[in-house]
């Protein structure tokens, strides 16, 4: 079991004019995030529109990503409701040398801790060599991990269940497990989380705030005075007024038009909201 530490962006997926995944540009985007401060990137998370992409597109990207210089810095999301498709995508990823996965429980149906335990047990029994970061985001899947469920999974699978991305924020302040990665899903929780023993963050807005977040992280680790945390939190607050995927694509799309391509039912911001976003960020002295 190895911990996952640091600043991770929930990477964007870049689409061409036909709304097909542009594999090369998506990987280049992920490389740039790491070059600009992120320790790693989660591929095919909710920010990457994973639930809207086809399995064939995911496989095409994984094939190319396996040759990438930052291969060990990627956390592979599955973004699939189907247990069997999740297991199959992990099989392909494993064959390409990936071992770290970000997996959310299925959406739509109502269920509880016992059913979640069974879901992950079946994945791990099929692939005991992998490491899983649980994705706790009730807003998207309808289920919120309890501390008891996480502890039960870790006790049963100590080598496989290695962390939680906590975007429901009910775990990061109180759940304490040795040699376990707790990763809140917002920059506003970064410094507080680090003080509580968290390992870092995995966030959507680190697609644009990676450098700032890395500064906060490094200063904490080096016991230096914090100079960027307030700005980082205020930038996050601006983005939280909007759908994060829409706002990120809209902002980056002002520099590279290909980012304006987004899969329905998602859409970029209208012109009024986009200009409001840009002006509010500029008032914080934050630009791309």
Image (spheres, rainbow, N blue to C red):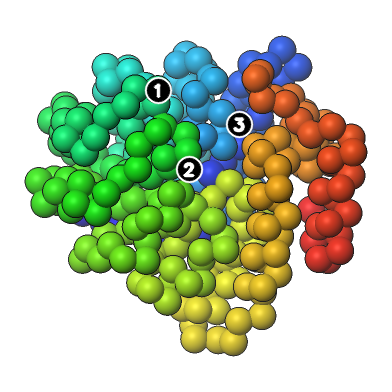
Query: How far separated are the C-alphas under marks 2 and 3?
Result: 11 Å
Image depth: mark 1 or mark 2 in front: 1
User: How many neighbours does mark 2 have within 10 angstroms: few (below 14), some (14-19), or many (20 or more)?
Assistant: many
Give whichever of discs 2 and 3 has the lower sequence position. 3
Q: Please name whichever residue, 203 or 76, is drawn nearer the observer in this view of the structure.
A: 203
- What residue is disc 2 on? 42
Q: Position of residue 34 (x, y in %)?
A: 57, 53
Residue 172 to residue 40: above or below = below
Give whichever of discs 1 and 2 has the lower sequence position. 2
Q: Position of residue 98 (x, y in %)?
A: 34, 37
- What residue is disc 1 on? 108
Residue 140 to residue 86: above or below = below
Give whichever of discs 3 and 1 has the lower sequence position. 3
Circles 1 and 2: CB atoms closer than 8 Å? no
Instruction: Say left or right for 134 vs 288.
Output: left
Residue sitting at x 37%, y 66%: 173
């Amino acid at each position: 079991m190895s911990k996952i530490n640091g600043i991770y962006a929930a990477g964007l997926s870049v689409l061409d004019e036909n709304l097909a995944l542009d594999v090369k540009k998506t990987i280049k985007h992920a490389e740039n995030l790491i070059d600009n401060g992120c320790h790693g990137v989660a591929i095919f998370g909710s920010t990457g529109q994973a639930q809207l992409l086809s399995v064939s597109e995911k496989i095409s990207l994984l094939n190319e990503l396996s040759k990438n210089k930052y291969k060990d810095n990627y956390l592979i999301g599955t973004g699939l409701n189907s247990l069997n498709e999740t297991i199959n995508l992990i099989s392909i990823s494993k064959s390409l040398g990936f071992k770290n996965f970000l997996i959310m429980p299925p959406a739509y149906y109502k269920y509880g801790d016992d059913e979640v335990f069974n879901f992950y047990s079946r994945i791990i029994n099929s692939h005991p060599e992998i490491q899983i970061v649980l994705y706790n985001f009730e807003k998207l899947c309808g289920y919120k991990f309890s501390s008891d469920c996480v502890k039960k999974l870790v006790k049963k699978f100590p080598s496989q269940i290695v962390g939680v991305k906590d975007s429901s924020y009910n775990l990061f302040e109180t759940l304490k497990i040795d040699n376990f990665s707790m990763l809140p899903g917002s920059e506003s929780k970064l410094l507080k989380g680090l003080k509580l023993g968290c390992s870092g963050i995995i966030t959507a807005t680190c697609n644009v705030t990676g450098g700032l977040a890395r500064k906060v992280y490094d200063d904490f680790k080096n016991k230096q005075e914090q100079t960027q945390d307030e700005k980082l939190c205020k930038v996050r607050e601006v983005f939280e007024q909007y759908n994060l995927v829409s706002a990120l694509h809209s902002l980056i799309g002002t520099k590279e038009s290909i980012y304006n391509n987004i899969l329905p039912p998602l859409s970029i911001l209208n012109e009024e909201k986009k200009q409001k976003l840009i002006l509010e960020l500029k008032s914080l002295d934050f630009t791309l």
